[in-house]
Image (cartoon, rainbow, N blue to C red):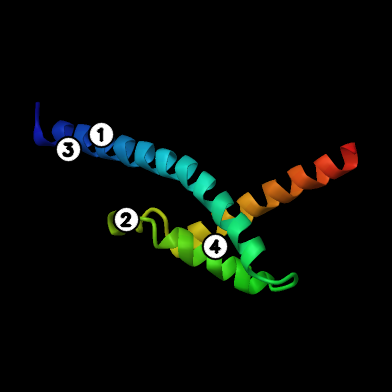
Amino acid sequence: MNWLSISIIAVAVIVAVIFLVYKIKKDGLRKVAIEFIVLAEEKFEHGKNSAKFNYVFESVYCLIPIWLKFIFTKQNVISFIQKTFKEIKIALDYQNTEK
């Protein structure tokens, strides 16, 4: 094997490992984000959405190890929290229409 083949295999393995870590962390972070969303709803008054979001963002982002922050950028975490919140809202709205 030449160095090019070894390099390609090494890069492929590294990319696969990073993808798996990303997937595992994302699924685990979803549960944590939901817990922080619930805490923010209890902690802040109705209408203080910016404070709630900042609380959830700071709480989730500080849990991410430094070596994963190049994958989980601040913008990725913001999008992730917004998506999680929308999913919760859709589920709650659906639940309310079923009653």
Q: Secondary structure at mark 1?
A: helix
Amino acid at pointer 1: Val
Q: Which residue is mark 3?
A: 7
Mark 2 to mark 4 CA distance (whole Å): 17 Å
Disc with the residue nearer the chain's start (2 vs 3): 3
Q: Nearer the viewer, mark 2 or mark 4?
A: 4
Q: Which residue is mark 1?
A: 13
Split into 4 quadrants, where in the image is the C terminus? top right
- Residue 73's image quarter? bottom left
Q: Secondary structure at mark 3?
A: helix
Mark 1 to mark 4 CA distance (whole Å): 33 Å
Disc with the residue nearer the chain's start (3 vs 4): 3
Q: Which residue is mark 2?
A: 65
Between 58 and 11, the one nearer to me in the picture: 58
Which label sits on residue 56? 4
Disc with the residue nearer the chain's start (2 vs 1): 1
Q: Are marks 2 and 3 in contact (CB under 8 Å)?
A: no
Amino acid at pointer 2: Pro
Between 86 and 45, the one nearer to me in the picture: 45
